[in-house]
Image: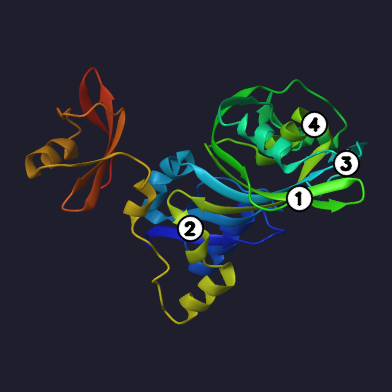
Amino acid sequence: MINGIINLQKEAGMTSHDAVFKLRKILHEKKIGHGGTLDPDVTGVLPIAVGKATRVIEFMTEAGKVYDGQVTLGYATTTEDASGEIIDKTPVRPGLTAEDIDVAMASFVGEITQIPPMFSAVKVKGKKLYEYARAGEFVERPKRQVVIKSFVRTSCLERDGELVRFSFRVICSKGTYVRTLAVDLGQRLGLASHMSQLQRTASAGLELSKALTLKEIEEMVRRDDWSFLLPIEVGLADLPRVSLSEEEVAHIRHGRFISLPNQETVLAAFYQDKAAAILEKRDGLYKPRKVLLS
């Protein structure tokens, strides 16, 4: 069995599921999953877990993410991104300044409430929102709390007639809809808007500069070069870490509780620099949630 983490550079035009499907064919391995969905139009880092590494995929999904993108002020779309149909137009006033935009962006930093877009995979009453949207049906969408750690403009304003575009970078928690953030930013400025470009540049400790495309991975497999497979420990990079003694590892192997001088709810436990277990605190003691040692 093949085991490890892959830092995949997802290209535009494919879903995250498509990427997993193609990797199954390239690697001849069925046990593959991804850590954090990317919309088809969004490119960038898609963490992939193979074999035993799928046991830590939920912790990769929980990790924070970094995106670089572009907002267009002046019109809104059905999908909140460039692929949708125009549903509203508001000419950008000549007096709008970069400072106005920066102040509005800064107001989103912290914990905020988002309403997922109708064209999204969030389920309501057993159906995905985009299924309702394609059928022309509107349903009440559940609100969600997300955390924006940073939301900053990274370019000058580009004026194009009655439109204004600018680039941005956002560091955010799991579950954040960046296109919704772009729409909400426009509303705060009194303008229709949408997200016109997006690329995920980091996720679960993996960076775009080191990501590989499907074509590159396929070529490496053809050469019998498996160096693209990263150790399972990479998938635990965002969890607080603790080192265990040989005696503590023996208890963990048997599913017993252990006492550790730590206040974290969930810990990545290591033994001799190898991932040993995911520990969860219960009633003051730590119990193995997942044992990772063979």
The answer to whether residue 159 is seen in the rendering is: yes
- Please name whichever residue, 66 or 62, is drawn nearer the observer in this view of the structure: 66
Where does label 1 land, which residue? 157
Where does label 2 land, which residue? 207
**The N terminus appears in which quarter of the rendering?**
bottom left
Where does label 4 land, which residue? 132
Looking at the image, the residue that sits furthest to the left is 247
Spatial CA span between label 1 and label 3: 12 Å
Check disc 2 and give the amino acid type.
Glu
Spatial CA span between label 2 and label 1: 27 Å
On screen, residue 152 above or below 43? above
**Mark 4: secondary structure:** helix
Quick check: 70 left or right of 9? right
Looking at the rendered image, the disc whose residue lies closer to the viewer, 3 or 2, is 3
Spatial CA span between label 3 and label 4: 38 Å
Where does label 3 land, which residue? 94
